Structures are given as C-alpha cells and as structure tokens.
Amino acid sequence: MPRPSLSLIALALAGGTASAQAGFLPTRVGACVATTIESIETRLMDGATNTPIPNSGSAVRFANGGYQVSYDTVPAIEESRKGDRVRMCFISTPLNCPPGDNRGKVYYTTNLRTHKSWKLPDAEHSCGGA
C-alpha cells in the first residue's frame, strides 16, 4: 500500500480540504469531508450472540457510510463517542486492484471533540487480499 505524503497528512491536520461535502465519502486523494460517528465497534463480533469480541481490534462506522478498522485497539477510537463530529480525509488508495475490488482505501480521521486522530483503512485486507 502506498504511504500517504506528509503534505496530505499536514492538510488533514490543518483542517484544509479539497472538498467539504458533509454526508459523502471523499473520492479524491487529498479530499476531506465532515461527518459524524455512527458507532464504535470491535473488529470482530460473536455471530452467535451478536456481542463484541474484546481485544479483537477497533472499528468505527460513520454517518456518511465510511468505515475504518484495525487489528489493534486504537485509543483515539475508543475515546470517541457516537455522534462525535469528525473530519475524514482520503489519503491513499492501493494500486493494481482487481476489477470490482475497492478495499484498502486509507483515511486520516480527526475527532473534533477530542482532537485525536487515527489513520486506518476501510477494510481488514487491501484489494486482492483475503
């Protein structure tokens, strides 16, 4: 996966934006949007009981349809709450993906209440992966 440029991360930190349409996922690398957190989750759920599996990582869903996930527990996500306003910036996309496999986009998200940020992909595996 290509590494995001420092200028894109700086843009996200500074609150700059190439696009600021609330309610939509940014579609261009470098674009940012405002949205809210819909839910804070763990990476895995127990299918039989529909309960979170502790220590399985962090996941977050956004009102604009966005999703970010990590195998690790991400403190900045764990400190967030449903309804928190965030700024989500699209910072990288994988190359040479099979047709129709859109996984692996990376977003840099800042919680506007806590002022804490995280950089995570939209799926557990990048395109072409498991």
Image: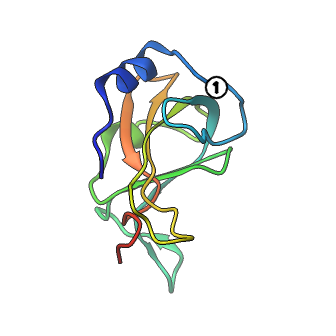
Q: Quadrant of residue 19?
A: top right
* Image side of residue 12 versus residue 62, left or right: left
Number of marks drawn: 1
Q: Is residue 84 above or below residue 82?
A: above
At mark 1, the secondary structure is: loop
108 left or right of 17 in image: left
Residue ID at (44%, 61%): 123
Q: What residue is drawn where x is 29% and y is 24%?
A: 6
Which of 88/85 is in front?
A: 88
Question: Which quarter of the image is occupied by the C terminus?
Answer: bottom left
Foreground pick, 41 / 51: 41
Q: Position of residue 118 (x, y in %)?
A: 36, 36
Report the side of 118 relative to 66 (left or right).
Answer: left
The residue located at (71%, 29%) in the rendering is 21
Mark 1 surroundings: few (<14), some (14-19) or many (≥20) residues within 10 A? some
**Could you tell me which residue is drawn at 50 percent across and 15 percent down?**
15
Q: Where is residue 122 drawn, in percent x and y?
A: 47, 54
- The residue wearing badge 1 is 19
**Residue furthest to the front:** 96
Q: Where is residue 84 drawn, in percent x and y?
A: 58, 32
Amino acid bearing label 1: Ser
Q: Position of residue 116 (x, y in %)?
A: 38, 26
Which of the 4 image quarters holds residue 14? Answer: top left
The scheme the figure's colours follow is rainbow
